[in-house]
Image (cartoon, rainbow, N blue to C red):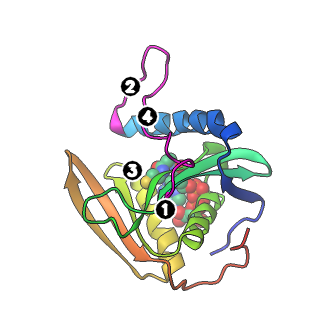
Amino acid sequence: MDLPSDWTLTNVKESERDLLEQLLQFYLYDFSEMDDEEVDESGRFRYPVTGPYGREPGRHALLLRVRGKPAGFVLVDERSPIPGSEDRRYVREFFVMRAYRRHGYGAAMAWAIFDRFPGRWQVEQIGPNVGAQAFWRRVIGAYTAGRFSERTEEREGLTLVIQEFDTSAKAVTWTERDR
Ligand SMILES: CC(C)(COP(=O)(O)OP(=O)(O)OC[C@H]1O[C@@H](n2cnc3c(N)ncnc32)[C@H](O)[C@@H]1OP(=O)(O)O)[C@@H](O)C(=O)NCCC(=O)NCCS
């Protein structure tokens, strides 16, 4: 898979917390088309759990920059919060700003976290998010040379598409992997 090289993915610093919160708002806005979330009287979406990410062990907040400019973020749990899946890593949130989409940055970010946190993984998408489903099938498929499983589950009134795979033994070499 061809991946771009003009990007970085770094731990969110305390000085970048406001930036993370702002990008999160854009992400929630995108999602509101699918989950019908509404903004409060300050015009913001509520999101309760960013605080621990990047501050507590096993919870990571990573910022994507393209040519130095903020372009996305990912929140990763080293242990999935889904009951019965605690032995798996988990993508809590994953976002590429619209201006940077379909240039391979999402794939680059996904491959980078799979490299950075080798092990068994679980990724979920809500049913209506068919673009994200196509994205994850493509990048996980390329990373694992097709060795992943997929199932659909109903949880709290939502249909979830779930992929599971293992990144301990990487199938494909990527020369940019150490960035
Ligand atoms: C899903 C998302 C992260 C993809 O980021 P991206 O940088 O555009 O993805 P890439 O350019 O790396 O895409 C890699 C491949 O995935 C597939 N893909 C990506 N987005 C797709 C879409 N909307 N529809 C169908 N396939 C898609 C394509 O095969 C693509 O390769 P191609 O462009 O050569 O055809 C981005 O659209 C996004 O942030 N969406 C909103 C938030 C979201 O849904 N996050 C995921 C939550 S589970």
Q: Is mark 3 within 8 Å of ligand 1?
A: yes
Tell me which amino acid carries mark 4: Tyr
Residue 177 locus on image (x, y percent): 68, 74
Of mark 3 and mark 2, the one earlier in the sequence is 2
Q: Which residue is mark 4?
A: 47
Residue under pointer 3? 129
- Residue shown at 31%/52% (left/top)? 127
The residue that disc 2 covers is 38
What amino acid is found at the position of numbered circle 1 in the picture? Phe
In the rendered image, the vertical position of residue 11 relative to residue 170, given as above or below: above
Tell me where the magenta segment starts and ends, as one range.
35-58
As shown in the figure, which amino acid type bears the numbered disc 2? Answer: Glu
Q: Identify the residue position indicated by label 1 in the image.
A: 135
Indicate which disc, 1 or 3, sits on the residue closer to the N terminus: 3
Where does the N terminus fall, quadrant-wise?
A: bottom right
Residue at the location (57% across, 49% down)?
A: 54
Q: Does the Cβ of the disc 2 residue fall within 8 Å of ligand 1?
A: no
Q: Measured from the top left, where is residue 126 in percent x and y? A: 33, 51
- Mark with earlier residue (2, 4): 2
